[in-house]
Amino acid sequence: MKDVDLSQEWALLLGELDRHVSSGRLSPDTATLSDLMRVYQVPGVSIAVGQVNGRVWATGYGVTGGEASTPVTAGTAFAACSISKHVAAFGALLLVQDGALDLDADISEYLNSWQLLDRAGQQPRVTVRQLLAHTAGLSDTWYRGYAADRAPSLLQVLEGGGSTTTPPVRATLLPGSRFRYSGSHYSVLQQLMVDVTGTPFEDLMRSLVLEPVAMADSSFDQQFPHQRPHPVARGHHGGGAGVPGGWRVQPETAAAGLWSTPTDLLRLDLEIARAASGDSKLLSRDLATEMWTPQIPGGVHGLGTELTDRVGCRRFGHTGQNVGYTCFSSVWPDSGTAVAAMTNSEDGWELLASIRAAADRRYATDVTAEPLGDVAGRYVLRDDYPIDIAVSDGQLTFSAAGQQPVVLLAEPGGRYLHPGLDLEVRFVQTDDQHHILELRQEGVTQTARNLTVRNN
């Protein structure tokens, strides 16, 4: 990527954010960041942009909230919410790399202070990989946090005892059969990492991840906001009401308990990007690649990582929402750029989605479209649903299951849009130099095989 002034670039981007981000295309209805903060009643936002070459730009907007409210700066700490999982996964993979853990070993080999059971009291076989990928089928749980004087221990959370407000963590689905996002997977991972190393989780993550990655403004210690000399953003419910006490305590620290800044978060994603290219001194290329490889075919989740991989937009990272906070951290590996943003509001996601959409348009790498003649032919979504692709007057036509042919609208990056439907089409070349057809509708991707090739 050419050398640009990130501050000037982002001053322009934040001055023209799209209010309608779901289409993936810039609409005429735009607003400034301050406009969106006012509309969604978001008191404070912090943003950082970094590149693999070490250049970073970071700043804050709005206020921290509370009686002694101060301006948000690049150094203001926020709750990192579920991005905690992304950071914890990096730590777990470092333990795998060191030989302390095996991704595909039964977790019962490592747990000694607690054991996972199903509802009948039997012990299922669950692996470390399945915990990291949310495929172990554990209890469906979202952690809302606790007042400081009401917080249970992690073991109480796992057993559903004490002041815990969530059910006991149990295996409730067939392990490995499907994806189900749940913080309970990372609570078990947290206890497993503590049992294996004999080290409190916050201390383990500090020495294993935070210090080596230079995340100096981050901590899994729930006392961090009180001990920090710099301002901490106080959480706000939807509508702007402050969270009593400023924030909630999260004993489920691996799942939702990290405190951090956008600058620290993007440091981790850039380190993973470097590792995936073989340029990290911390994590191997193979393990980094596992982080952003779908663990369920066609899925959008790797090992502790949310994935977007389509023509015109390839990125990975994680999003998060706790009581009082929202955030995201993403890296576009082909352009070597990461963006992270954090808010102190539950209503912050619409604003964050607009910021990330602006980053998509700026940093996603275009993919060259395939020659039209190479993709023409008959494809089948299933045996009773053929799709015919033809070339007419230099344009692709599309006809599905007896529908009238329509001319597809060519978009940058090798994408095509149906002129009348919410349908995106792209052609992907396989290892044998043939093509498959991908149909994307409402965020769901379906694949059609090339029947013409099969019959040749």
Image (cartoon, rainbow, N blue to C red):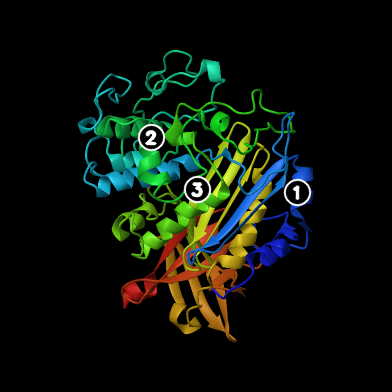
Q: Position of residue 83 (x, y in %)?
A: 49, 43
Residue kind at label 3, given as amino acid type: His
Callout 1 touching callout 2 (CB < 8 Å): no
Secondary-structure class at tag 3: strand
Mark earlier in primary sequence (1, 3) = 1
Residue placed under numbered mark 2 in the picture? 203
Residue kind at label 2, given as amino acid type: Asp
Viewer-closest of 63 and 160? 63
Give residue 364's quadrant in the image.
bottom right
* Residue 198 seen in render: yes
Residue kind at label 1, given as amino acid type: Leu
Report the number of discs.
3
Viewer-closest of 143 and 58? 58
Task: Decide: is 333 above or below 252.
Answer: below
Viewer-closest of 56 and 307? 56
**Alpha carbon of mark 1 to alpha carbon of mark 2: how far?**
38 Å
Q: Residues within 10 Å of mark 2 (few under 14, many from 20)?
A: some
Q: Position of residue 168 (x, y in %)?
A: 40, 21
The residue positioned 63% from the left and 58% from the top of the image is: 357
Q: In the displayed orientation, state which residue is furthest to the front.
A: 229
Residue placed under numbered mark 3 in the picture? 318
Relative placement, left or right, of 232 versus 140 is right
- Name the image quarter holding the N terminus: bottom right
Mark on residue 36? 1
Secondary-structure class at tag 1: helix
Callout 2 touching callout 3 (CB < 8 Å): no
